[in-house]
Image (cartoon, rainbow, N blue to C red):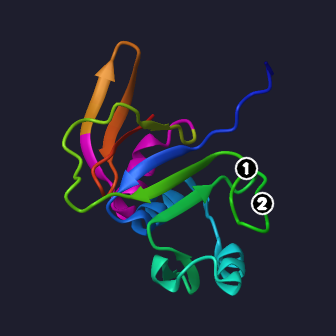
Amino acid sequence: MTSTPLHWKLVIDAQDPHAQADFWAAALHYDIEDHSALIGKLLGFGAIQPEILIDHHDRRAWRDAAAVRHPDDPYDAESGTGLGRRLLFNRVPGSERKTAKNRLHIDLHGPAGERDAEVERLRALGARIQSHVKEQGGEWVVMTDPEDNEFCVH
């Protein structure tokens, strides 16, 4: 058994993976993963069919998946896949809508003293304020992304 830390990514179900990737890339100042080189290679080999692809940001992308990665983390240049901090958005059927509070959520920690400005920046990107929490242990704003997934801004 190895004690090497495991590589992981957070996978989020989405109605529109590319819109979610656009939102979260802007929210986190992350990069949208570019898988077009891998897609081109797979198309050239005949390993995939064009109907599983879309054009997004003037490049070929997977129709049902999109990802964002931290700009300082390593990535595989051949596939465009991040090898560090990343979020992957997978399409779910239109009938599979979010119906309850998230069991897992992202906490955003911006510069000290700039929470209100960060909340307004996120609102301009399409997030909505759900509540403002003030407790003995701290204060934060609960927001929702464009598909109603909760996240907190501290």
Residue at point 69%, 38% (across, down)? 7
**Vertical relation: 32 (above or below) 54:** above
Q: Are marks 1 and 2 in contact (CB under 8 Å)?
A: yes
The one of 108 and 52 positioned closer to us in this rendering:
52
- Seen from this angle, which residue lies furthest front? 46
Q: Which mark is residue 1?
A: none
Image coordinates of residue 127 in percent, x first then y, are: 33, 55
The one of 2 and 127 positioned closer to us in this rendering:
2
Q: Which mark is residue 83?
A: 1
Magenta-highlighted residues: 112-130
Image coordinates of residue 92 in percent, x first then y, are: 33, 57
The quadrant of the rendering that contains the C terminus is top left
Image coordinates of residue 80 in percent, x first then y, are: 70, 65
Left or right, 102 with reference to 118: left
**Vertical relation: 51 (above or below) 78:** below
Left or right, 35 with reference to 83: left
The first of marks 1 and 2 along the sequence is 2
Q: Residue 90 sits in which quadrant? A: bottom left
Residue 123 among magenta residues = yes
Dot 1 amino acid type: Leu
Q: Secondary structure at mark 2?
A: loop
Dot 2 amino acid type: Asp
Label 2 environment density (alpha carbons within 10 Å; few <14, some 14–19, many ≥20):
few
Label 1 environment density (alpha carbons within 10 Å; few <14, some 14–19, many ≥20):
some
Q: Residue 5 sits in which quadrant? A: top right
The quadrant of the rendering that contains the N terminus is top right
Left or right, 8 with reference to 119: right
Image coordinates of residue 44 in percent, x first then y, are: 70, 86
Q: Which residue is mark 2?
A: 76
